[in-house]
Amino acid sequence: METTLVIIRGNSGSGKTTLAQALQRRVGHHHTLLVSQDVVRRDMLMSHDYPGNISIGLIEQIACYGLGRVPVVIVEGILARDRYGKMLARLSQSFPRVLTYYFEVSFATTLARHQKRHRDFGVEDMRRWWLPHDTLGVANEVLIGEQQDLTTEVQQIMTTIHDCD
């Protein structure tokens, strides 16, 4: 089985988790492994996000577990380039097919999207975490803009996954 790695990155509140979860539902049961940075770092390890934190290696190991076991592995999170870039590069070399997406949306948009959800952090936290244009700069990295809706985003990724088959 050839496994496609889908990397979805962006700032807090940009829409990456919503997209990753919708994509997983669309691909279906037993066909995806969703690796969420927040789940691994905050929930499983209760770790802060700093260079070299232990979640980096665990995210990589969990994603690699899906290689050859499921058709699609989704890795999503802020996944700041300076902290997670090397790990994402290694993952990308491990998988036969890699699709990389980055939410390129304004701070105002992330705030508006954040206010629609109840979270345990606020505007000042989001401002502190903000990383403008933190793309990986890899070939075929797709930028997702503010104007795209969730249905369109999911359909575009599904089409690309199927085009790779």
Image (cartoon, rainbow, N blue to C red):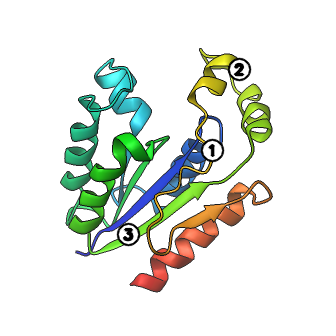
Q: Residue at x 24, y 47 (%)?
A: 60
Between tags 3 and 1, which lies in front? 1
**In this image, 17 relative to 46: left or right?**
right
Q: Position of residue 27 (x, y in %)?
A: 47, 62
* Disc 2 from disc 3: Cα separation: 33 Å
Q: Which residue is mark 3?
A: 98
Q: Which residue is mark 1?
A: 132
Q: Quadrant of residue 148?
A: bottom right
**Quadrant (top left, top right, bottom left, bottom right) of the N terminus:** bottom left
**Disc 2: which residue:** 123
**Which three-letter amino acid code belongs to the residue tagged 3?**
Val
Left or right: residue 24 versus residue 159 is left
Q: Earlier in the sequence, mark 2 or mark 1?
A: 2
Up the image or down, 84 lies above or below 152; here it is above
Disc 1: CA contacts within 10 A as few (<14), some (14-19) or many (>=20): few
Residue 14 % position (x, y): 65, 42
Q: Position of residue 138 (x, y in %)?
A: 44, 68
In which quarter of the view is residue 97 placed?
bottom left
| Front residue (pair 9, 32) | 9
Q: Secondary structure at mark 3?
A: strand
- Residue at point 45%, 74% (across, down): 139
Marks 2/1: CA–CA distance: 16 Å
